[in-house]
Image (tube, helix red, strand yellow):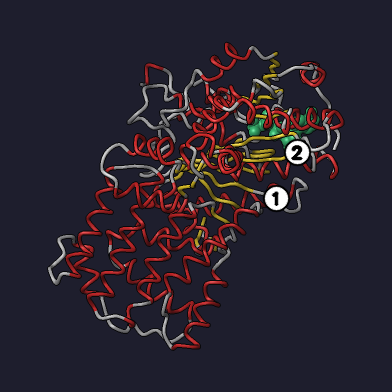
Amino acid sequence: MTFRLSDEAARALEHEGSILVTGGPGSGKTTLALLKAKQLTPTLQPGQKILFLSFSRAAMRQVLTRTKDVLKYAERREIVVMTYHAFCLGLLKSHGRLLTGTAPRILFPGPERLTRAKHEGDWNHEVLRLATEEGRYAFSTFAGSSAVLLRRADSVRRLISDAYPIIILDEFQDTDDSQWALVQELAKGSLLITLADPDQRIFEYQDNIDPLRLHYFRQALKPAEFDLGGDNHRSPNAGILQFADAILKNESPTPSDDVKQVTYYASSRNGMVHAAVIWMLRRLRKQGIDVPTVAVLARSNPFVADVSIVLSTPNTFKNRELKPVDHHVVWDAELTAAAAQVVASILEWPLHDEVHGVAITLDAVAHFYDVKYAEKPSASAASSASAFRSAAEAVRGGRTPRIQAAKLLLALHVEDPGYNGDTAADWFVARRIIEAIPKLSEVATSARFVRLFRATDEIGGRLAAQWASTGTYTDARTIVRRTLEVGRVAANEQEATGVVLMTMHKSKGKEFDGVILVEGQYRGPFFNTRSEPWPYAASRRLLRVGITRARHRVMILRPNGALPLYQPQEMA
Ligand SMILES: Nc1ncnc2c1ncn2[C@@H]1O[C@H](COP(=O)(O)OP(=O)(O)OP(=O)(O)O)[C@@H](O)[C@H]1O
Protein backbone atom coordinates (compact mmCIF):
# COMPACT_ATOMS: atom_id res chain seq x y z
CA MET A 1 0.00 0.00 0.00
CA THR A 2 1.29 3.50 -0.76
CA PHE A 3 0.68 6.38 1.57
CA ARG A 4 0.79 10.01 0.57
CA LEU A 5 1.69 12.12 3.54
CA SER A 6 0.60 15.68 4.24
CA ASP A 7 3.41 18.16 4.99
CA GLU A 8 2.64 17.95 8.69
CA ALA A 9 2.76 14.14 8.66
CA ALA A 10 6.03 14.22 6.67
CA ARG A 11 7.55 16.59 9.25
CA ALA A 12 6.48 14.23 12.05
CA LEU A 13 8.13 11.37 10.20
CA GLU A 14 11.40 13.25 9.87
CA HIS A 15 11.53 14.58 13.44
CA GLU A 16 14.21 12.86 15.48
CA GLY A 17 13.01 13.09 19.08
CA SER A 18 9.83 12.08 20.88
CA ILE A 19 6.64 13.24 19.19
CA LEU A 20 2.99 13.75 20.03
CA VAL A 21 0.69 13.23 17.04
CA THR A 22 -2.86 14.51 17.37
CA GLY A 23 -5.66 14.38 14.81
CA GLY A 24 -9.27 13.43 14.24
CA PRO A 25 -10.71 10.01 13.37
CA GLY A 26 -9.04 8.48 10.32
CA SER A 27 -6.43 11.26 10.10
CA GLY A 28 -3.72 8.61 9.86
CA LYS A 29 -2.19 8.67 13.35
CA THR A 30 -1.74 4.91 13.61
CA THR A 31 -0.46 4.66 10.06
CA LEU A 32 2.05 7.44 10.68
CA ALA A 33 3.31 5.71 13.83
CA LEU A 34 3.82 2.50 11.88
CA LEU A 35 5.61 4.35 9.06
CA LYS A 36 7.88 5.86 11.66
CA ALA A 37 8.50 2.42 13.12
CA LYS A 38 9.40 1.21 9.63
CA GLN A 39 11.86 4.04 9.26
CA LEU A 40 13.43 3.38 12.67
CA THR A 41 13.80 -0.41 12.57
CA PRO A 42 17.25 -0.23 10.88
CA THR A 43 18.52 1.79 13.87
CA LEU A 44 17.74 -1.01 16.34
CA GLN A 45 20.64 -2.95 17.87
CA PRO A 46 20.44 -6.75 18.09
CA GLY A 47 17.90 -7.74 20.76
CA GLN A 48 16.12 -4.39 20.67
CA LYS A 49 12.50 -4.01 19.59
CA ILE A 50 9.95 -1.28 19.08
CA LEU A 51 7.15 -1.57 21.65
CA PHE A 52 3.57 -0.66 20.67
CA LEU A 53 1.41 -0.31 23.78
CA SER A 54 -2.37 -0.48 23.55
CA PHE A 55 -5.21 -0.77 26.06
CA SER A 56 -7.03 -3.91 25.06
CA ARG A 57 -6.54 -7.11 23.18
CA ALA A 58 -9.14 -5.95 20.68
CA ALA A 59 -7.11 -2.78 20.02
CA MET A 60 -3.98 -4.86 19.80
CA ARG A 61 -5.54 -7.10 17.16
CA GLN A 62 -6.57 -4.04 15.23
CA VAL A 63 -3.00 -2.77 15.21
CA LEU A 64 -1.59 -6.16 14.23
CA THR A 65 -3.93 -6.25 11.23
CA ARG A 66 -2.91 -2.72 10.33
CA THR A 67 0.82 -3.50 10.50
CA LYS A 68 0.38 -5.79 7.50
CA ASP A 69 -0.60 -2.79 5.32
CA VAL A 70 2.49 -0.84 6.28
CA LEU A 71 5.31 -3.18 7.23
CA LYS A 72 7.07 -6.07 5.57
CA TYR A 73 7.29 -9.38 7.40
CA ALA A 74 10.87 -8.77 8.53
CA GLU A 75 9.92 -5.30 9.81
CA ARG A 76 6.89 -6.63 11.67
CA ARG A 77 9.18 -8.93 13.61
CA GLU A 78 10.92 -5.87 15.01
CA ILE A 79 7.72 -4.61 16.62
CA VAL A 80 6.15 -6.03 19.74
CA VAL A 81 2.49 -5.11 20.12
CA MET A 82 1.34 -5.54 23.71
CA THR A 83 -1.37 -4.39 26.06
CA TYR A 84 -0.29 -2.39 29.10
CA HIS A 85 -1.48 -5.38 31.11
CA ALA A 86 0.73 -7.90 29.33
CA PHE A 87 3.73 -5.59 29.42
CA CYS A 88 3.34 -4.95 33.16
CA LEU A 89 2.64 -8.61 33.89
CA GLY A 90 5.97 -9.54 32.29
CA LEU A 91 7.75 -6.78 34.16
CA LEU A 92 6.32 -7.75 37.56
CA LYS A 93 6.91 -11.45 37.04
CA SER A 94 10.55 -10.90 36.11
CA HIS A 95 11.48 -8.15 38.55
CA GLY A 96 8.61 -7.83 41.07
CA ARG A 97 10.71 -9.49 43.74
CA LEU A 98 12.68 -6.24 43.98
CA LEU A 99 9.56 -4.52 45.36
CA THR A 100 8.70 -6.73 48.31
CA GLY A 101 11.55 -9.21 48.58
CA THR A 102 9.14 -12.09 47.91
CA ALA A 103 8.32 -13.90 44.70
CA PRO A 104 5.51 -11.97 43.00
CA ARG A 105 2.15 -13.70 42.71
CA ILE A 106 -0.59 -12.67 40.33
CA LEU A 107 -4.21 -12.35 41.41
CA PHE A 108 -5.98 -13.23 38.16
CA PRO A 109 -9.37 -11.63 37.34
CA GLY A 110 -11.44 -14.73 38.13
CA PRO A 111 -10.11 -15.20 41.67
CA GLU A 112 -9.98 -11.42 42.12
CA ARG A 113 -13.68 -11.16 41.32
CA LEU A 114 -14.55 -13.74 43.92
CA THR A 115 -12.28 -12.22 46.57
CA ARG A 116 -13.64 -8.78 45.77
CA ALA A 117 -17.28 -9.84 45.93
CA LYS A 118 -16.71 -11.22 49.42
CA HIS A 119 -14.52 -8.38 50.65
CA GLU A 120 -16.13 -5.85 52.91
CA GLY A 121 -14.61 -2.40 52.75
CA ASP A 122 -12.76 -0.48 50.08
CA TRP A 123 -11.48 -2.90 47.46
CA ASN A 124 -9.11 -0.36 45.88
CA HIS A 125 -7.45 -0.01 49.23
CA GLU A 126 -7.25 -3.78 49.67
CA VAL A 127 -5.65 -4.46 46.28
CA LEU A 128 -3.00 -1.86 47.01
CA ARG A 129 -2.33 -3.50 50.35
CA LEU A 130 -2.08 -6.92 48.70
CA ALA A 131 0.45 -5.54 46.20
CA THR A 132 2.64 -3.54 48.56
CA GLU A 133 2.54 -5.86 51.58
CA GLU A 134 2.09 -9.32 50.11
CA GLY A 135 3.48 -9.01 46.59
CA ARG A 136 0.12 -10.21 45.20
CA TYR A 137 -0.78 -8.21 42.15
CA ALA A 138 -4.35 -7.81 40.92
CA PHE A 139 -4.63 -6.65 37.31
CA SER A 140 -5.73 -3.19 38.41
CA THR A 141 -2.44 -2.71 40.27
CA PHE A 142 -0.16 -3.84 37.44
CA ALA A 143 0.56 -0.45 35.93
CA GLY A 144 0.91 1.39 39.25
CA SER A 145 3.20 -1.29 40.71
CA SER A 146 5.27 -1.38 37.52
CA ALA A 147 5.69 2.40 37.71
CA VAL A 148 6.90 2.11 41.30
CA LEU A 149 9.26 -0.69 40.27
CA LEU A 150 10.82 1.37 37.47
CA ARG A 151 11.09 4.41 39.74
CA ARG A 152 12.83 2.49 42.51
CA ALA A 153 15.00 0.17 40.47
CA ASP A 154 16.89 2.31 38.03
CA SER A 155 18.71 -0.70 36.61
CA VAL A 156 15.39 -2.31 35.61
CA ARG A 157 14.21 0.94 34.06
CA ARG A 158 17.41 1.15 32.00
CA LEU A 159 17.10 -2.48 31.04
CA ILE A 160 13.58 -1.88 29.70
CA SER A 161 14.56 1.23 27.80
CA ASP A 162 17.49 -0.61 26.35
CA ALA A 163 15.22 -3.45 25.19
CA TYR A 164 12.60 -0.99 23.88
CA PRO A 165 14.35 2.21 22.82
CA ILE A 166 11.24 3.30 20.90
CA ILE A 167 7.73 3.05 22.35
CA ILE A 168 4.47 3.87 20.56
CA LEU A 169 1.56 4.88 22.81
CA ASP A 170 -1.84 4.55 21.17
CA GLU A 171 -5.05 6.40 22.17
CA PHE A 172 -3.16 8.37 24.77
CA GLN A 173 -6.27 10.41 25.72
CA ASP A 174 -7.59 7.29 27.50
CA THR A 175 -4.48 6.72 29.63
CA ASP A 176 -5.36 6.31 33.30
CA ASP A 177 -3.46 7.66 36.29
CA SER A 178 -1.26 4.64 36.89
CA GLN A 179 -0.50 4.10 33.20
CA TRP A 180 0.55 7.74 33.07
CA ALA A 181 2.90 7.17 36.02
CA LEU A 182 4.40 4.25 34.09
CA VAL A 183 4.75 6.29 30.89
CA GLN A 184 6.67 8.98 32.76
CA GLU A 185 9.20 6.36 33.84
CA LEU A 186 9.48 4.90 30.34
CA ALA A 187 9.98 8.40 28.91
CA LYS A 188 13.22 8.76 30.88
CA GLY A 189 15.05 6.37 28.59
CA SER A 190 12.94 5.63 25.51
CA LEU A 191 11.80 7.71 22.58
CA LEU A 192 8.00 8.06 22.64
CA ILE A 193 5.67 8.24 19.67
CA THR A 194 2.37 9.24 21.22
CA LEU A 195 -0.98 9.29 19.40
CA ALA A 196 -4.07 11.07 20.66
CA ASP A 197 -7.42 12.56 19.78
CA PRO A 198 -8.91 14.36 22.78
CA ASP A 199 -12.34 14.21 21.15
CA GLN A 200 -12.25 10.40 21.11
CA ARG A 201 -12.13 10.38 24.89
CA ILE A 202 -14.97 8.00 25.66
CA PHE A 203 -13.95 6.31 28.88
CA GLU A 204 -13.97 9.43 30.99
CA TYR A 205 -16.67 8.02 33.26
CA GLN A 206 -13.84 6.05 34.85
CA ASP A 207 -12.61 8.46 37.45
CA ASN A 208 -8.93 7.69 36.91
CA ILE A 209 -9.06 8.89 33.29
CA ASP A 210 -8.37 12.58 33.38
CA PRO A 211 -9.60 14.93 30.62
CA LEU A 212 -6.45 16.99 31.25
CA ARG A 213 -4.09 14.08 30.58
CA LEU A 214 -2.74 15.54 27.33
CA HIS A 215 -2.13 18.83 29.04
CA TYR A 216 -0.06 17.12 31.76
CA PHE A 217 1.77 15.13 29.12
CA ARG A 218 2.73 18.27 27.20
CA GLN A 219 3.86 20.00 30.37
CA ALA A 220 5.87 17.12 31.75
CA LEU A 221 7.53 15.71 28.65
CA LYS A 222 7.45 18.63 26.19
CA PRO A 223 7.27 16.48 23.03
CA ALA A 224 7.40 18.00 19.54
CA GLU A 225 3.75 18.17 18.50
CA PHE A 226 2.25 17.46 15.09
CA ASP A 227 -1.43 17.99 14.41
CA LEU A 228 -2.95 16.03 11.54
CA GLY A 229 -6.16 17.95 12.26
CA GLY A 230 -9.04 17.11 10.02
CA ASP A 231 -7.09 14.98 7.49
CA ASN A 232 -9.38 12.13 6.61
CA HIS A 233 -7.97 9.04 4.95
CA ARG A 234 -10.68 6.66 6.10
CA SER A 235 -13.59 8.15 4.21
CA PRO A 236 -12.01 10.91 2.09
CA ASN A 237 -14.81 11.13 -0.46
CA ALA A 238 -17.72 10.90 1.92
CA GLY A 239 -19.31 13.56 4.09
CA ILE A 240 -19.06 11.25 7.06
CA LEU A 241 -16.40 13.10 9.05
CA GLN A 242 -18.07 16.52 8.55
CA PHE A 243 -21.35 15.04 9.70
CA ALA A 244 -19.73 13.49 12.77
CA ASP A 245 -17.87 16.69 13.61
CA ALA A 246 -21.13 18.65 13.43
CA ILE A 247 -22.69 16.24 15.91
CA LEU A 248 -19.65 16.60 18.17
CA LYS A 249 -19.97 20.39 18.15
CA ASN A 250 -23.76 20.35 18.34
CA GLU A 251 -24.07 22.11 15.00
CA SER A 252 -26.64 21.46 12.32
CA PRO A 253 -25.08 18.71 10.17
CA THR A 254 -24.73 19.24 6.43
CA PRO A 255 -26.82 16.60 4.68
CA SER A 256 -24.69 14.03 2.93
CA ASP A 257 -25.58 11.20 0.56
CA ASP A 258 -23.30 8.98 2.58
CA VAL A 259 -25.13 9.50 5.86
CA LYS A 260 -28.74 8.43 5.81
CA GLN A 261 -31.05 9.24 8.73
CA VAL A 262 -34.18 7.18 9.19
CA THR A 263 -36.95 7.44 11.77
CA TYR A 264 -38.93 4.40 12.80
CA TYR A 265 -42.18 3.86 14.66
CA ALA A 266 -42.20 1.34 17.48
CA SER A 267 -44.37 -1.11 15.54
CA SER A 268 -41.98 -1.19 12.57
CA ARG A 269 -38.69 -1.27 14.46
CA ASN A 270 -37.74 -4.88 13.82
CA GLY A 271 -38.50 -4.81 10.11
CA MET A 272 -36.73 -1.47 9.75
CA VAL A 273 -33.53 -2.56 11.52
CA HIS A 274 -33.47 -5.81 9.58
CA ALA A 275 -34.10 -4.06 6.25
CA ALA A 276 -31.43 -1.45 7.02
CA VAL A 277 -28.74 -4.11 7.35
CA ILE A 278 -29.79 -5.79 4.09
CA TRP A 279 -29.96 -2.42 2.35
CA MET A 280 -26.50 -1.46 3.60
CA LEU A 281 -24.94 -4.72 2.40
CA ARG A 282 -26.59 -4.33 -1.00
CA ARG A 283 -25.50 -0.71 -1.44
CA LEU A 284 -21.91 -1.50 -0.53
CA ARG A 285 -21.84 -4.42 -2.96
CA LYS A 286 -23.23 -2.16 -5.68
CA GLN A 287 -20.38 0.20 -4.90
CA GLY A 288 -17.97 -2.58 -5.86
CA ILE A 289 -17.14 -3.99 -2.44
CA ASP A 290 -17.59 -7.74 -2.89
CA VAL A 291 -17.45 -8.74 0.75
CA PRO A 292 -18.46 -5.68 2.74
CA THR A 293 -18.03 -5.31 6.48
CA VAL A 294 -20.93 -3.67 8.30
CA ALA A 295 -21.05 -2.69 11.96
CA VAL A 296 -24.37 -2.29 13.72
CA LEU A 297 -23.72 -0.13 16.77
CA ALA A 298 -25.89 0.64 19.78
CA ARG A 299 -25.24 2.29 23.11
CA SER A 300 -26.03 -0.54 25.47
CA ASN A 301 -25.33 -4.27 25.62
CA PRO A 302 -28.98 -5.29 26.17
CA PHE A 303 -30.00 -3.36 23.10
CA VAL A 304 -27.22 -5.00 21.06
CA ALA A 305 -28.72 -8.31 22.21
CA ASP A 306 -32.19 -7.18 21.07
CA VAL A 307 -30.86 -6.29 17.63
CA SER A 308 -29.19 -9.69 17.39
CA ILE A 309 -32.53 -11.38 18.04
CA VAL A 310 -34.14 -9.24 15.34
CA LEU A 311 -31.50 -10.26 12.79
CA SER A 312 -31.72 -13.92 13.76
CA THR A 313 -35.42 -14.23 12.98
CA PRO A 314 -37.46 -13.70 9.81
CA ASN A 315 -39.18 -10.30 9.63
CA THR A 316 -41.25 -8.41 7.17
CA PHE A 317 -40.72 -4.91 5.89
CA LYS A 318 -43.13 -3.21 3.48
CA ASN A 319 -44.75 -6.62 2.90
CA ARG A 320 -41.45 -8.24 1.97
CA GLU A 321 -40.08 -11.26 3.75
CA LEU A 322 -36.62 -10.71 5.21
CA LYS A 323 -34.47 -13.75 5.87
CA PRO A 324 -32.27 -13.95 8.97
CA VAL A 325 -28.89 -12.27 8.52
CA ASP A 326 -25.72 -14.10 9.56
CA HIS A 327 -23.85 -11.93 12.03
CA HIS A 328 -21.35 -11.83 14.87
CA VAL A 329 -21.84 -10.08 18.17
CA VAL A 330 -18.95 -8.64 20.14
CA TRP A 331 -20.10 -9.57 23.59
CA ASP A 332 -18.74 -9.79 27.07
CA ALA A 333 -17.05 -13.17 27.20
CA GLU A 334 -16.87 -13.40 30.98
CA LEU A 335 -20.58 -12.82 31.50
CA THR A 336 -21.47 -15.30 28.79
CA ALA A 337 -19.25 -17.95 30.35
CA ALA A 338 -20.92 -17.34 33.73
CA ALA A 339 -24.39 -17.58 32.19
CA ALA A 340 -23.46 -20.77 30.35
CA GLN A 341 -22.58 -22.29 33.69
CA VAL A 342 -26.08 -21.55 34.94
CA VAL A 343 -27.44 -23.54 31.99
CA ALA A 344 -24.91 -26.30 32.66
CA SER A 345 -26.02 -26.49 36.30
CA ILE A 346 -29.53 -27.32 35.06
CA LEU A 347 -28.09 -30.04 32.85
CA GLU A 348 -26.79 -31.56 36.09
CA TRP A 349 -30.21 -31.60 37.79
CA PRO A 350 -30.93 -35.32 37.20
CA LEU A 351 -27.76 -36.11 39.16
CA HIS A 352 -28.98 -34.47 42.35
CA ASP A 353 -32.03 -34.25 44.54
CA GLU A 354 -34.20 -31.16 44.31
CA VAL A 355 -32.42 -29.32 47.11
CA HIS A 356 -28.93 -29.77 45.77
CA GLY A 357 -29.97 -29.28 42.14
CA VAL A 358 -31.66 -25.93 42.76
CA ALA A 359 -28.91 -24.81 45.14
CA ILE A 360 -26.13 -25.29 42.57
CA THR A 361 -28.16 -23.32 40.03
CA LEU A 362 -28.70 -20.50 42.55
CA ASP A 363 -24.96 -20.51 43.28
CA ALA A 364 -24.25 -20.28 39.56
CA VAL A 365 -26.62 -17.30 39.29
CA ALA A 366 -24.89 -15.63 42.27
CA HIS A 367 -21.57 -16.17 40.48
CA PHE A 368 -23.02 -14.54 37.34
CA TYR A 369 -23.78 -11.40 39.37
CA ASP A 370 -20.31 -11.50 40.98
CA VAL A 371 -18.85 -11.39 37.50
CA LYS A 372 -21.23 -8.63 36.50
CA TYR A 373 -20.26 -6.63 39.56
CA ALA A 374 -16.57 -7.09 38.84
CA GLU A 375 -17.05 -5.88 35.26
CA LYS A 376 -18.85 -2.76 36.38
CA PRO A 377 -19.54 -2.32 40.08
CA SER A 378 -23.17 -1.50 40.77
CA ALA A 379 -25.36 -1.79 43.83
CA SER A 380 -27.90 -3.87 41.92
CA ALA A 381 -25.36 -6.52 40.84
CA ALA A 382 -23.95 -6.73 44.36
CA SER A 383 -27.38 -7.12 45.95
CA SER A 384 -28.47 -9.69 43.34
CA ALA A 385 -25.32 -11.74 44.03
CA SER A 386 -25.96 -11.74 47.74
CA ALA A 387 -29.72 -12.40 47.35
CA PHE A 388 -29.06 -15.48 45.19
CA ARG A 389 -26.32 -16.69 47.50
CA SER A 390 -28.66 -16.39 50.51
CA ALA A 391 -31.37 -18.17 48.55
CA ALA A 392 -28.97 -21.06 47.88
CA GLU A 393 -28.19 -21.26 51.60
CA ALA A 394 -31.90 -21.17 52.48
CA VAL A 395 -32.67 -23.99 50.05
CA ARG A 396 -29.78 -26.07 51.40
CA GLY A 397 -31.02 -25.44 54.94
CA GLY A 398 -34.55 -26.56 54.07
CA ARG A 399 -36.01 -23.05 54.38
CA THR A 400 -38.16 -21.20 51.87
CA PRO A 401 -36.00 -18.74 49.93
CA ARG A 402 -37.05 -15.11 50.07
CA ILE A 403 -36.67 -14.18 46.44
CA GLN A 404 -39.32 -14.95 43.88
CA ALA A 405 -36.82 -16.19 41.29
CA ALA A 406 -35.63 -18.92 43.67
CA LYS A 407 -39.21 -19.93 44.48
CA LEU A 408 -39.93 -20.17 40.74
CA LEU A 409 -36.81 -22.24 40.22
CA LEU A 410 -37.98 -24.65 42.90
CA ALA A 411 -41.40 -24.79 41.27
CA LEU A 412 -39.88 -25.49 37.86
CA HIS A 413 -37.47 -28.08 39.16
CA VAL A 414 -37.96 -31.58 37.87
CA GLU A 415 -35.57 -34.40 38.58
CA ASP A 416 -35.46 -35.20 34.90
CA PRO A 417 -36.24 -32.39 32.47
CA GLY A 418 -36.34 -35.02 29.71
CA TYR A 419 -32.74 -34.98 28.49
CA ASN A 420 -31.99 -37.57 25.83
CA GLY A 421 -28.38 -37.01 24.83
CA ASP A 422 -29.13 -34.71 21.91
CA THR A 423 -26.93 -32.01 23.43
CA ALA A 424 -28.25 -29.09 21.36
CA ALA A 425 -31.84 -29.96 22.26
CA ASP A 426 -30.99 -30.65 25.91
CA TRP A 427 -29.10 -27.35 26.18
CA PHE A 428 -32.17 -25.62 24.81
CA VAL A 429 -34.45 -27.37 27.34
CA ALA A 430 -32.19 -26.19 30.19
CA ARG A 431 -32.02 -22.66 28.82
CA ARG A 432 -35.81 -22.51 28.52
CA ILE A 433 -36.08 -23.03 32.27
CA ILE A 434 -34.02 -19.88 32.84
CA GLU A 435 -36.01 -18.01 30.22
CA ALA A 436 -39.22 -18.86 32.04
CA ILE A 437 -38.09 -16.85 35.08
CA PRO A 438 -38.45 -13.12 34.45
CA LYS A 439 -35.82 -12.15 37.03
CA LEU A 440 -33.25 -14.27 35.21
CA SER A 441 -33.70 -12.49 31.89
CA GLU A 442 -30.18 -11.05 32.02
CA VAL A 443 -28.70 -14.49 32.56
CA ALA A 444 -30.83 -15.85 29.72
CA THR A 445 -29.71 -13.08 27.36
CA SER A 446 -26.04 -13.69 28.06
CA ALA A 447 -26.49 -17.46 27.77
CA ARG A 448 -27.80 -17.01 24.24
CA PHE A 449 -24.39 -15.73 23.16
CA VAL A 450 -22.40 -18.84 23.89
CA ARG A 451 -22.36 -19.48 20.16
CA LEU A 452 -20.34 -16.30 19.70
CA PHE A 453 -17.33 -17.92 21.15
CA ARG A 454 -17.27 -20.53 18.42
CA ALA A 455 -17.25 -23.05 21.20
CA THR A 456 -20.74 -24.44 20.74
CA ASP A 457 -19.56 -27.44 18.76
CA GLU A 458 -16.77 -28.05 21.20
CA ILE A 459 -19.12 -27.87 24.21
CA GLY A 460 -21.64 -30.05 22.39
CA GLY A 461 -18.94 -32.60 21.54
CA ARG A 462 -17.64 -32.83 25.10
CA LEU A 463 -21.12 -33.02 26.61
CA ALA A 464 -22.06 -35.69 24.07
CA ALA A 465 -18.95 -37.70 25.01
CA GLN A 466 -19.94 -37.42 28.65
CA TRP A 467 -23.47 -38.58 27.86
CA ALA A 468 -22.13 -41.46 25.77
CA SER A 469 -20.03 -42.77 28.61
CA THR A 470 -22.31 -42.07 31.59
CA GLY A 471 -25.81 -41.39 30.25
CA THR A 472 -25.69 -38.12 32.24
CA TYR A 473 -24.24 -34.64 32.09
CA THR A 474 -21.93 -35.18 35.04
CA ASP A 475 -19.50 -32.25 35.47
CA ALA A 476 -21.37 -30.19 32.86
CA ARG A 477 -20.37 -26.96 34.62
CA THR A 478 -16.68 -27.85 34.55
CA ILE A 479 -16.87 -29.00 30.93
CA VAL A 480 -18.50 -25.73 29.89
CA ARG A 481 -16.12 -23.56 31.90
CA ARG A 482 -13.01 -25.24 30.55
CA THR A 483 -14.21 -25.20 26.96
CA LEU A 484 -15.10 -21.54 27.13
CA GLU A 485 -11.73 -20.68 28.60
CA VAL A 486 -10.07 -22.27 25.60
CA GLY A 487 -12.69 -21.04 23.12
CA ARG A 488 -12.44 -17.50 24.37
CA VAL A 489 -8.80 -17.32 23.46
CA ALA A 490 -9.54 -18.57 19.96
CA ALA A 491 -12.41 -16.09 19.54
CA ASN A 492 -10.17 -13.28 20.71
CA GLU A 493 -7.64 -14.05 18.02
CA GLN A 494 -10.09 -13.62 15.21
CA GLU A 495 -11.28 -10.38 13.73
CA ALA A 496 -14.98 -10.61 12.94
CA THR A 497 -16.00 -10.01 9.34
CA GLY A 498 -19.36 -9.52 7.60
CA VAL A 499 -22.07 -8.06 9.83
CA VAL A 500 -20.88 -7.35 13.37
CA LEU A 501 -22.94 -6.03 16.28
CA MET A 502 -21.40 -4.24 19.23
CA THR A 503 -21.66 -1.25 21.50
CA MET A 504 -20.27 2.07 20.30
CA HIS A 505 -17.61 1.88 23.00
CA LYS A 506 -16.34 -1.39 21.59
CA SER A 507 -16.11 0.02 18.07
CA LYS A 508 -13.27 2.36 19.02
CA GLY A 509 -10.21 2.00 16.78
CA LYS A 510 -12.07 -0.25 14.33
CA GLU A 511 -13.00 0.37 10.71
CA PHE A 512 -15.88 -0.95 8.56
CA ASP A 513 -17.25 -0.30 5.09
CA GLY A 514 -20.66 0.60 6.47
CA VAL A 515 -21.92 1.57 9.91
CA ILE A 516 -25.51 1.50 11.17
CA LEU A 517 -26.18 3.29 14.43
CA VAL A 518 -29.40 2.19 16.10
CA GLU A 519 -31.13 3.97 18.93
CA GLY A 520 -33.76 2.13 20.93
CA GLN A 521 -37.16 3.45 21.86
CA TYR A 522 -36.70 2.63 25.52
CA ARG A 523 -33.16 1.31 25.74
CA GLY A 524 -29.88 2.75 24.55
CA PRO A 525 -30.83 6.39 23.91
CA PHE A 526 -28.11 8.27 22.01
CA PHE A 527 -28.05 11.12 24.52
CA ASN A 528 -27.48 10.38 28.16
CA THR A 529 -29.76 13.16 29.37
CA ARG A 530 -29.95 11.76 32.89
CA SER A 531 -26.34 12.22 33.86
CA GLU A 532 -24.96 14.72 31.37
CA PRO A 533 -25.79 18.39 31.08
CA TRP A 534 -26.86 19.87 27.74
CA PRO A 535 -25.40 19.62 25.10
CA TYR A 536 -24.38 16.07 26.24
CA ALA A 537 -20.73 16.37 25.26
CA ALA A 538 -19.70 12.83 26.27
CA SER A 539 -22.60 11.30 24.31
CA ARG A 540 -21.59 13.40 21.31
CA ARG A 541 -17.99 12.19 21.47
CA LEU A 542 -19.25 8.63 21.54
CA LEU A 543 -21.57 9.17 18.56
CA ARG A 544 -18.69 10.69 16.61
CA VAL A 545 -16.49 7.67 17.34
CA GLY A 546 -19.29 5.36 16.13
CA ILE A 547 -20.06 7.32 12.96
CA THR A 548 -16.42 7.73 11.93
CA ARG A 549 -15.78 3.98 11.95
CA ALA A 550 -17.30 3.94 8.45
CA ARG A 551 -15.27 4.03 5.27
CA HIS A 552 -18.19 4.52 2.88
CA ARG A 553 -21.67 4.74 4.35
CA VAL A 554 -23.52 5.46 7.54
CA MET A 555 -27.14 4.93 8.44
CA ILE A 556 -28.67 6.32 11.61
CA LEU A 557 -31.90 4.68 12.79
CA ARG A 558 -33.80 6.52 15.48
CA PRO A 559 -37.23 6.14 17.04
CA ASN A 560 -39.93 8.64 16.35
CA GLY A 561 -39.75 11.43 18.93
CA ALA A 562 -36.03 11.01 19.75
CA LEU A 563 -34.08 14.12 20.71
CA PRO A 564 -32.74 15.74 17.53
CA LEU A 565 -29.02 15.36 16.84
CA TYR A 566 -28.66 19.12 16.72
CA GLN A 567 -30.13 20.78 19.78
CA PRO A 568 -29.78 24.55 20.08
CA GLN A 569 -29.86 25.76 23.67
CA GLU A 570 -33.41 27.05 23.42
CA MET A 571 -34.53 23.43 22.97
CA ALA A 572 -32.68 22.25 26.06
N1 LIG B 1 -1.32 8.75 4.24
C1 LIG B 1 -2.28 7.88 3.97
N2 LIG B 1 -2.59 7.59 2.70
C2 LIG B 1 -3.58 6.71 2.40
N3 LIG B 1 -4.32 6.05 3.30
C3 LIG B 1 -4.07 6.30 4.59
C4 LIG B 1 -3.04 7.22 5.00
N4 LIG B 1 -3.03 7.27 6.34
C5 LIG B 1 -4.01 6.42 6.75
N5 LIG B 1 -4.62 5.83 5.71
C6 LIG B 1 -5.75 4.87 5.79
O1 LIG B 1 -6.83 5.56 6.45
C7 LIG B 1 -7.46 4.74 7.41
C8 LIG B 1 -7.38 5.39 8.79
O2 LIG B 1 -6.01 5.50 9.18
P1 LIG B 1 -5.53 5.35 10.70
O3 LIG B 1 -6.20 4.21 11.33
O4 LIG B 1 -4.05 5.42 10.69
O5 LIG B 1 -6.14 6.66 11.34
P2 LIG B 1 -6.28 7.06 12.87
O6 LIG B 1 -6.02 8.52 12.92
O7 LIG B 1 -5.38 6.21 13.68
O8 LIG B 1 -7.82 6.71 13.13
P3 LIG B 1 -8.74 6.59 14.45
O9 LIG B 1 -8.26 7.64 15.42
O10 LIG B 1 -10.11 6.86 13.96
O11 LIG B 1 -8.58 5.19 14.96
C9 LIG B 1 -6.76 3.39 7.32
O12 LIG B 1 -7.55 2.56 6.48
C10 LIG B 1 -5.42 3.70 6.67
O13 LIG B 1 -4.93 2.60 5.93
Q: Where is residue 266 in the image (x, y as percent from the top left)?
A: 39, 48
How far is disc 2 from disc 1 in space, using C-alphas?
30 Å
Above-or-below relation of 321 to 513:
below
Horizontally, residue 183 falls left or right of residue 404, namely right
- Amino acid type of disc 1? Pro
Residue that carries the numbered disc 1 in the rendered image: 292
Residue marked by disc 2: 79
Up-down relation of residue 534 to residue 478 (above or below): above
Examine the rendering and report whether any part of residue 236 can be seen: no
- Above or below, comparing residue 242 to residue 134 in the picture: above
Q: What element carries label 1?
A: loop
| Number of callouts | 2
Q: Which of marks 2 and 1 is in front?
A: 2
Give the percent coordinates (x, y) of residue 216.
54, 15
Q: Provide residue 438's location: percent of width, then percent of height.
A: 28, 61
Image quadrant in which you'd find residue 71: top right
Q: What element carries label 2?
A: strand
Q: Which amino acid does label 2 sit on?
A: Ile
